[in-house]
Image (cartoon, rainbow, N blue to C red):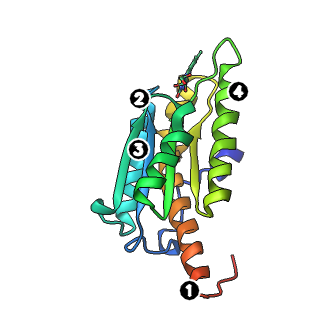
Amino acid sequence: MASALKNLSQYDEHSIPSAEEMRFGIVVAEWNATITHALYEGCYDTLIKHGAKPENIRTVQVPGSFELPTGARILNGQYNPDAVICLGCVIRGETSHNEYINTAVANGLMQLSLVAGKPFIFGLLTPNDEQQALDRAGGKHGNKGVEAAVTAIRMAALKKEQAEGKKKIGF
Ligand code: RBF
C-alpha cells in the first residue's frame, strides 16, 4: 500500500516545466543491461515527451554503475548539459560489494552536483533481487528512469528560473 503511494512514475504531466530549451546528458551502465536499458527507454521517452529535442540529448555507456560518476563528469565536461542523468542497477549479492558501489555512486554524484552547481541525477536501482529491479524498470512500481527524467527537468528548470531572477514558490 505504502509503496503504491510512492510510485512517482505517475505524476501530473502538466506540472512539469517544458524541456524544449534544455540539454541533457544520460549515462547508462551496461551491467544488468535488461534493466538499465528499460530505465533508459523510460528516461529518454519522458524527456522527449516534455519537449526535449533528440539532438539535445547525449548518451554514453559505461561498464558498470561504479563508473557512472566518472562517465557523468566526462560527459559534463565535453557537452555541458543542463542536467546529467545516471542510470544503473546494482543487485545485492552474497557479499557487500553492492554497498560499496551504491555508496560510491551516491557520494560521487552528490559531489559532482555540488561542485558543478547543476543536477546529476541518481537513477541507480539498489534491489535485493532481479524481480525487485524489474518491478522498478517498467513493472508494478513504475519506471525509475521516468522519475529520473522528471527530476532532471524540474531541477534544470529551477536553475534556469533562479538565473533569470524568477521567483517561484508553492507546492
Ligand atoms: N555493476 C553494476 O552496475 N551492477 C552490479 O550489480 C554489479 N555487481 C558487481 C559485483 C562485483 C562483485 C563486482 C566486482 C563488480 C560489480 N559491478 C556491478 C561492476 C562495477 O560497477 C564496476 O564496473 C567494476 O567494479 C569495475 O570498476
Q: How many labels does the image show?
A: 4
Q: Which of marks 4 and 3 is nearer the N terminus?
A: 3
Lower position in the chain sequence, tag 2 or tag 4: 2
**Rendered view: 164 above or below 53:** below
Earlier in the chain: of badge 1 and badge 3, it is 3
Residue at (59, 73) in percent of width and height: 158
Q: Which of marks 3 and 2 is nearer the N terminus?
A: 2
Q: Name the residue under label 4.
A: 99
**Residue where numbered disc 2 is placed:** 33
Element class at badge 3 = helix
Of labels 2 and 1, earlier in sequence is 2
Q: Mark 1 points at which residue?
A: 164
Q: Which of 131 and 82 is in front in this view?
A: 82
Question: Who's the residue at 67% across and 11% down the image?
Answer: 94
Closer to us: 41 or 3: 41
Q: Is residue 157 left or right of residue 106?
A: left
Disc 2 versus disc 1: nearer the observer: 1
Q: Residue at x 64, y 21 (%)?
A: 92
Residue carrying label 3: 40
Identify which residue, 78 or 131, lies in the foreground. 78
Mark 2 in CB contact with mark 1 (< 8 angstroms): no
Q: Can residue 1 be seen in this view?
A: no
- Mark-to-mark CA distance, 2 and 4: 20 Å
Residue with the most extreme front position: 77
Spatial CA distance of label 2 from label 1 is: 40 Å
